[in-house]
Image: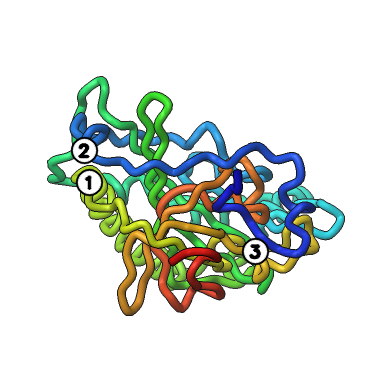
Amino acid sequence: MKRRHLITAAAAGLVLGGCAQPRRSVALGPDLGRAGVRLQRSLPAVLPGGAQVLPKAQLVLLPGESAAGMLVPVPFLAGAIAGAMDRSEAAAEAAQLATVDPYAMAQQAWQGSPLLSEAADALQLQPFAFLQASVDDRYRIAVVNQLTRGDWVGRYTVHLRSTYDSASFHSVTPALLQTLQGEMREASAVLRGLVERAARGELRGGGRRVDVGSLHLVGNKAAGVVSPTLLVARGAELIEEDAGHVLVRIDGDPAQPASAGGLFFGVHRLRKDQLHTFRPAQGAS
């Protein structure tokens, strides 16, 4: 049986050799959604390989990978490792970034939602953000709402429009924080809308399949070698498309490194100018 939703490239075997069958992204729908959602300040048990969690924050840092297979940490974590003289400065940068709180933003965004519930069987909703190092020396940020109930897992991701160079995280400025917080608040509100619509059964799509690629999905070289512009999610389900955005559902293995598709799983809202590949899937009508 042909498998869909895998990274494809000339060297795809190098990226995916030996990996497990990708997890299928299953729509939320009214049956699961009727018990409501309960916000929880925690992170998923399964994160992409090599992920670095910022202490006391809902921020998951995804470093790049060198050709030698070594993870290249984000700047302020690298500073913390470099030596005692750098540690206080690095800690200060990390503390500034930690003031950006996806959980607090989710609390604000979800106020008044009819889905909020304290029921024991409510879906657990974990709000957090990925900060991904990319091949162009930019960091790309995505805000995530992950929902779980029993064996079912759903992930809804909005990719922020602004990117940041490495120097920005060596010196976190008030302007950077203001931009980041503003875009994350906007994304949190969009995520509430997506989850509420999904719970009403409105995000099931029409069966159209596309190949989609973006540095926001895979930002760094796979195994330090394969260009991320060659890596696409094949046969993704196109849920919605308008003049500026696409909403797609992708299967994937959330335990894989980000450079090997660890961010694929779930529903993604992407701007069209964030895509390097968007085309009908091979064999799709």
Between 27 and 47, the residue placed more toward the observer is 27
Which residue is the site of mark 1? 201
Pinpoint residue 166: horizontal percent, then vertical percent. 64, 68
- Gap between marks 3 and 1, in whole Å? 31 Å
List the single residue furthest toward the top. Answer: 120
Pinpoint residue 96: horizontal percent, then vertical percent. 49, 56
User: Which disc number belongs to residue 231?
Assistant: 3
Label 1 CA crowd tier, 10 Å (few <14, some 14–19, many 20+): some
The amino acid pointed to by label 3 is Leu
| Placement of the N terminus among the 4 image quadrants | top right
Q: Is residue 224 left or right of residue 172?
A: right
Q: Earlier in the sequence, mark 2 or mark 1?
A: 2
Which residue is the site of mark 2? 30
> In this rendering, is residue 135 above or below 86?
below
Callout 2 secondary element: helix
Callout 1 secondary element: loop
The amino acid pointed to by label 1 is Gly
Q: Earlier in the sequence, mark 3 or mark 1?
A: 1
- Gap between marks 2 and 1, in whole Å? 6 Å
> In this rendering, is residue 83 above or below 28?
below
Pinpoint residue 225: horizontal percent, then vertical percent. 80, 63
Between 45 and 11, the residue placed more toward the observer is 11
